[in-house]
Amino acid sequence: MKVKNFLLVLIFGLTPLVWPQEAQAPQPRTSQPGEHRQKRMEMHKQEMEAMKADIEKLKSSLAQMKTNVAAIKDPPEKARWQTNVDMWETVVSHMDRMQKQMESMGPGMMHGPGMGGPPQPPPSEQKPQ
């Protein structure tokens, strides 16, 4: 009797696993290639606008720092703040150059090596078979 019960439990327990699974219907594509490109271009435009706004805020803060440094009378304190201003000038000018370069490259630039996409081998390099 125990063997019969065990077999019944085994049969009913494994039956759902061996039934053929329903084929999943392919999901309809919601956008055409042109729509995808348009969305990517819009996202690029929004990112560029956000980056420009951030850079402008940094430039404004940097101008305020320069004004504050000019008012400092203590030479060691002034030197420390001037070093800070110099560093921020370097960072802001670098960000400004990068933003202009990204803007000139367009939306596709985010898919190159080191930009979040898969690394691309140099054109002359052949992959082993």
Image (cartoon, rainbow, N blue to C red):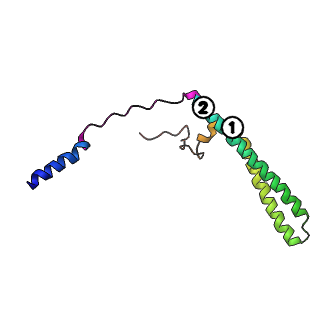
Q: Residues within 10 Å of mark 1 (few under 14, many from 20)?
A: some
Looking at the rendered structure, the secondary structure element under dot 1 is: helix
Residue 23 magenta: yes
Farthest left residue? 1
Please name the residue shown 78% across and 57% down the image. 88
Left or right for 37, reference 17? right
Q: In which image quadrant can residue 89 be found?
A: bottom right
Left or right for 53, reference 3? right
Left or right for 7, reference 77? left
Image x and y of residue 15, in percent: 22, 43
Image x and y of residue 57, in percent: 78, 51
Please name the residue shown 81% across and 52% down the image. 59
Label disc, if present, on residue 45 of the rendered structure: 1
The residues colored magenta run 17-34
Please name the residue shown 85% across and 72% down the image. 76
Q: Residues within 10 Å of mark 2 (few under 14, many from 20)?
A: some
The residue under label 1 is which amino acid type? Lys
Q: Quadrant of the image for the C terminus? A: top left
Label disc, if present, on residue 91 of the rendered structure: none
Q: Which residue is label 2 attached to?
A: 37
State how far apart marks 2 and 1 are (Cα). Answer: 12 Å
Q: In which image quadrant can residue 100 be found?
A: top right
Image x and y of residue 124, in percent: 54, 38
Looking at the rendered structure, the secondary structure element under dot 2 is: helix
- Relative to 3, residue 35 above or below: above
Please name the residue shown 89% across and 72% down the image. 74
